[in-house]
Structures are given as structure tokens and as C-alpha cells.
Amino acid sequence: MEAIFSTIDSDFYMKKVIYKRFSKQEIADLPLAEFGGRIVVVFSEGEAERAVDFLLTQPFLGIDTETRPSFRRGKLNQVSLLQVATDEICFLFRLNMMGITPAIVRLLENTEVPMIGLSLKDDIVSLKRRQNFTPGRFIDLQKMVGQLGIEDMSLQKLYANFFGQKISKRQQLTNWDADVLSDRQKRYAATDAWACIQMYREIGRLEATHDYELIENEEV
């Protein structure tokens, strides 16, 4: 009898709780999540070629972009940075300095290695403003979370929902066209791309196992 109840308890407690809408007020008290791997800033066409050669050997990639904010109505700045991450390393391509090189086009058009991001339509439009290309194998996490019943679409809320950790957004509105990016900017950019990999893996696990319970309200 004890063994039976142990099995039941184990099955009950193993289910992961996720929320249809995650309360933003709860995020402030969560522990901070940051990319802890190596960050490589890419300035030149040759460096981009070597980085892309490496990235296209990986099983999947996290991807994101940053643009210098504009505080004037009607003014739209070009995308400044493309960040592409694996679990251990993130490359920051300084597009404002070198543009979108042939190697970067090769990466963005690749149809073999999945490139995982959030709200990718906006990123692709921004990148195309610099250099036209045919989008390759992009996977948008916003579509995947909808299949689980989650309504939130922001990276910060989704990461908190899945992992109980917060991603700081303090660097979001900083100057991404600066001659030298600060360590905080680099860590922020890398974290956003790396977080997409972590969520992609976790969403895939939950879809395969159905090992989760969706809570309807916002209270955590």
C-alpha cells in the first residue's frame, strides 16, 4: 500500500505548473537569470565568416536583435546588433559597424539549423531593412507557447513562467550603436538569445510528456 501511494504522490508532484498569464508583479522578487558562457563580439567580415561556420555545426541556435532606441516620433533606427547563441557561447554581430555580410546572409538563409527566437517577424523585418535575404529555418516561440495555452508573449514573462527566474530588461533602451558595448549590454544581449534555446527545449519537453498543469489565473 505504501508503494502505491508513493507512486501516486510522485506522479502528482512531478507535474510542472505553468500559468496562462503570469503576473508581472511577481517577477521582481525572482532570482536573476543570466547567460554564463563565453561572449564574442564580431566586428569584421572575416570574423563573421568564422563565427557562422561554427554556428552552422550546432543543433539549434537562439537568435535576437537589438536596435538603438529612438525617442523622436517617426524616426526609425536601423538594427544595430544580431546576437546568436548556443548553450555555451554567444556571438554578437555589430551590424552597425560591418553591415550584414555574405556570411551572415548564409546564416539567416540556412534551412538546416533551427534559429529560435521570439517575435521573429519584427526581427526579420528589421534585418531586411539592412540587407534583403530569404528567411531560412526560423522558429518563433510565440507560436509554440500558444499551443500550450499560454497567452503571454514577452520574453521576461515567459522565462519567469517556465523557470521561476527573471531576465533583467534594464539595458534594453541603451545605446546599441555605441563604439564599445558595456559588459552589461553584452550580457543582456547574450541572455536574450540564450534564453530562447532554454525555452525551446523546455516547451518541447512539455509537449512530448504533457507533464504540466496550466493554471488559468494570474496569481502565482
Image (cartoon, grey):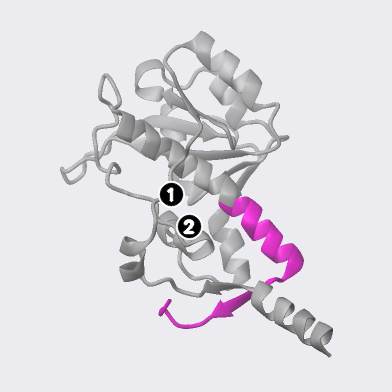
Vertical comparison of 160 with 60: above or below: below
Residue 114: x, y in percent?
66, 40
Q: Quadrant of the C terminus?
A: bottom left
Q: On the rendered structure, is 171 left or right of 61?
A: left
Q: Nearer the viewer, residue 218 or 68?
A: 218
Whether 97 is among the magenta residues is no
Q: Residue at x 39, y 30 (%)?
A: 81
The label shown at residue 159 is 2
Dot 1 corresponds to which residue?
33
Q: On the rendered structure, is 142 left or right of 78?
A: right
Q: Which residues are magenta?
A: 199-220
Q: On the rendered structure, is 193 left or right of 168?
A: right
Which image quadrant is residue 146 in?
A: bottom right
Q: Secondary structure at mark 1?
A: loop
Q: Secondary structure at mark 2?
A: helix
Label 1, label 2: how far apart the Cα atoms are: 9 Å
Q: On the rendered structure, is 213 left or right of 205?
A: left
Decide: marks 1, 2 in contact (CB < 8 A)?
A: yes
Residue 153: x, y in percent?
45, 61
- Can the viewer see residue 157 in this picture? yes
Q: How many marks?
A: 2
Whether 211 is among the magenta residues is yes
User: Which of the two discs, 1 and 2, labels the residue nearer the N terminus?
Assistant: 1
Q: Residue furthest top?
A: 46
Camera-nearest label, 1 or 2: 1
Q: What amino acid does circle 2 point to?
A: Tyr
